[in-house]
Image (cartoon, rainbow, N blue to C red):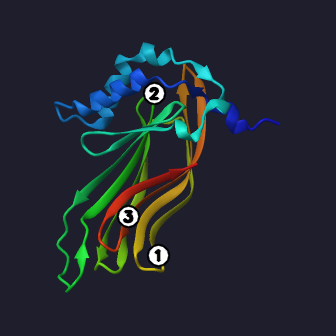
Amino acid sequence: MQDSKQETKIIIEPNFELEQGLVDALNSNLYNASKDDIISNYINNNKEKIKAQKDVNIATLKGDELRSYTLKDGSDIIFSGDWTFYVSEIKEEQINPLTRAGISYTPIITHSYSAYSWVGPRLFSIYTKGYFEYDGTTVEAHHMDSWYTRGTLSVWQVSNWEEGKYDHSSGTYSEFYGRGNFYFGFEIDGGNLILQDEYINLYVKCDEGGDYEKEMTKY
């Protein structure tokens, strides 16, 4: 029996011209518009090209076909072989913690991950927020909050949601995170429902020297 999830997921051939056009539009943001507005306008202006995308069998999609571009503002846009693409970014806020000898702090870090479709507005976003304290030998994460927001979706369910922090036993690695199963669906071609089921782990990790980076895994 064929996997029902496989039957509902439509894969499209990469259109590098469309992808590069969206990257260029996001990079040339002359009027400081939001990413949501830029993406929505770009999709509306390229409906015919998007409609011309050719459906191919799901078996042709491989993990190494994910394509990531770093934008001028430091965020990343990630294209896959289906009808969705993603924007991952970090925002920082300076903090003024109590002074402790030998202890340093990172800014407050908010890592966001937003899913979009080629046929409409933003689908959903996930966020995780916190900071780290470190002394060159050890590091400790301080998780402040993690959450998610729904965009324009026909089907939406979140399960197994978890948020918090993890300090490695060695003391030289720490992270804060938000993660869960996201089951969602949206319509294309005037009524065809596309369903996707993904486990997404969004986190920020840091070492004992205060070097941190955003990470995301999904499957």
Mark 1: secondary structure: loop
C-beta proximity under 8 Å, tags 2 and 3: no
Point 39% across, 64% down: residue: 205
Q: Where is residue 185 in the image (x, y as percent from the top left)?
A: 56, 36
Sequence-first tag of 2 and 1: 2
Sequence-first tag of 1 and 3: 3
Determine crowd level at label 1: few under 14, some 14-19, many 20+ residues with C-alpha closer than 10 A: some
Residue most extreme to the right: 1
Q: From mark 2 to mark 3, how far is it between C-alphas?
A: 30 Å
Q: In this view of the protein, which residue sits in the foreground, 212 or 34?
A: 212
Sequence-first tag of 2 and 3: 2
Frontmost of labels 1 and 3 is 1
Q: Which amino acid does label 3 sit on?
A: Asp
Q: What residue type is labelled 2?
A: Trp
Residue at image mark 3: 145
Q: Position of residue 198 (x, y in %)?
A: 57, 47
Mark 2: secondary structure: loop
Up the image or down, 13 lies above or below 112; here it is above
Residue at image mark 1: 168
C-beta proximity under 8 Å, tags 1 and 3: no
